[in-house]
Image (tube, helix red, strand yellow):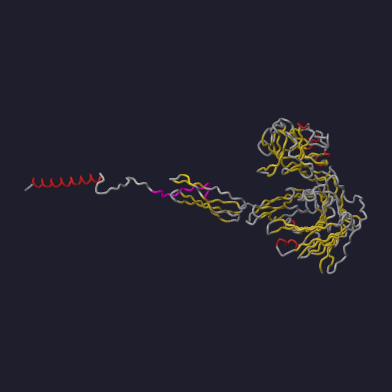
Amino acid sequence: MYPFNGLARLSKLGSIGILSGILSLILIACGGGGSSSSAPVNPPASDTTPPTITMVGAEAINHEQGTAYDDQGASASDSVDGAVSVSSSGEVGNTAGVYTITYSASDAAGNTATATRTITVADTQPPVISLIGDSEVSHEQGANYIDAGASASDLVDGDVEVLIAGDVDDEVGEYTVTFTATDAADNSATQTRLVTVVSSDTPQAISLSVLDNGEADSAFDAGLNGQDSTNNWGTSCSQDGGAACPNLSWQIVADVDRGNVLQIAHSAAGQQAIFFVKTNSPMDLSAYSTGNIIFDIKTVTGDSNYTMKVDCVYPCTSGDKAIGSHGASGWETVTVPVAELVSAGLQLVSVDTGIVIWASAYTSTIFQLDNVRWEGIDDGTGGTPMGGDDGWEIPNFSGYQSAASYDGYSQVWSDEFDGSEVDENNWGYDIGGSGWGNNELEFYTNRNAYLTDGNLVIRANKENYGGREYTSSRLKTQSKQTVNYGRIDIRAVMPQGQGIWPALWMLGSNFPTVGWPHSGEIDIMEMIGGSGRENTVHGTAHWYNQSNNQNASYGGNYELPSGETLSTNFHVFSIDWDSTSITWYLDNVQYHTMAINDSSSLAAFRKDFFFIFNVAVGGNWPQYPDASTVFPQRMVVDYVRVFQKD
């Protein structure tokens, strides 16, 4: 055995190997091994992460068609560069559909991120229906009811057809007329009118509007006014927004719930000033003796205590009436019994202000007014309009006579008005004083038309009735006599005077179900009274243009020779109407024609129509009577004749 010698060799060899390994490690650690370059111990990592895009608002949005789209945008942040800019692309159109907005952001290293917002555009809002006239009306039993109708407007489609449903019978009771409008996206809206049929001897509900939508009713023709103590109460601020009143001003403002309202402001000077709505023609409001003055008020800032009064012709007045605090928490309806004002001195036979009102503290108070009106029950004590023949003798008018016959035509209907009473087989009446969609001033009755000497007379009279200061009649052949094509001759003498508006016209027989203008309207004759206007006849057609969802009209006019007017003598107002055209004549002289094509818009003029004869007082077109207008005024009709082709 060689235990020691073998161990000795192993130790020697192992020592050499270990030493050599240690030297190698030392060389490597010291950068030896023949290389002169060096490498970083921790090299930096490259930027490979794109920014993060954060949209403001939801990724998917539903947007109402017809309204402007305003995108909320987006922001972007990068882990290296911080906030980076965002660009966007894409548009949101006006038509229904799905649209995208794409946002892009890039950092300094060229990394790009995108995000997309989806916008669904759809028409989800129904049309808005506006009733012509009040939502609740009383109708006298025995008179033919014709609804004033309604209009509808849609945010996307514009004017929309209104369908009318519901019958008003002759029996005493309540009836509902329903108006429906549907837009192209099949969104529907409905409105209703409650019609109460009352017996002829039942007291009638009456209403007189003073101020609405920030404006005075046309009956209060002196408009909006103020008086200021700084002016010693001597100078009125009339229709000027208070410019001449140092301590009072007013303006129309938009209320989020009501639309336009009137806002009245008292200054901080502590000087008293009052606001009032006035008429130039004092009214007999005796019919409202048991009624109320009603108005809506809201206090915007300042003290909410108010005082009001009503004036009759100076020095007549109700005196100041403190009505307490109102409107501090929002809109509030205030009711003031008329009897309380009468007991304090108001004389109802000569009222010349609809309301006078001011903030009791008259310092730094701003308040809003809306829907100011008088309401009452006409129990007959206020008088009835002049009825029937008033003894007026028709002047010895001459003038044009139309032909008794026409080649190729046969007479199919006429009314020569040669009886003693208006023929109920031919004519009914519209009753009421709603303004008839034109802001007219008269109350239509069945008492202002009569026959005398072979003529129909329609009289417009200045008298207070039904909350209106004028009366007249509006006769119609609806549901009695209709016409579809033919030659129509009407011989008549017109009334005269500023604000007088006579008309001989026709409406489509489907008016109660489709409303105006979808029913179509043919104005055979219209004249607007006033200096320089009474020698001109106007002939016009009205309809609904389905191609652009707009009301449409096409009219012409003809002027008589110098010095002659339509009230001087009889003239014959005519149309010749067939499926292709309507042509207008005055004394058989053609002055206007309109082609009827095959479009659905003009389909109304290929259907039955009924006649309407009326004399309106005031309105949007003629404007209103003034001091030069003489009453009564009368339209005299000799005959109406209808001929149709053989």
Vertical order, 560 against 299 (above or below): below
| Residue 493 falls left or right of residue 230 | right
- Spot the residue most to the top: 270
Q: Quadrant of residue 538?
A: bottom right
Image location of residue 386, percent across then percent down: 87, 47
Image location of residue 286, percent across then percent down: 82, 40
Does the magenta segment cover residue 132? Answer: no
| Residue 10 falls left or right of residue 609 | left
Decide if residue 478 is in sight here.
no
Residue at 15 percent of width and 45 percent of height = 15
Does the magenta segment cover residue 55? Answer: yes
Of 609 and 573, nearer the camera is: 573
| Residue 19 falls left or right of residue 314 | left
- Spot the residue most to the left: 1
Image location of residue 208, percent across then percent down: 78, 43
Our reading of the magenta stretch's main secondary structure is loop
Residue at 55 percent of width and 51 percent of height = 61
Q: Quadrant of residue 379?
A: top right
Of 353 and 11, nearer the camera is: 11
Image location of residue 630, percent across then percent down: 87, 47
- Spot the residue most to the front: 36
Vertical order, 17 against 361 (above or below): below
Q: Which residues are magenta?
A: 46-59
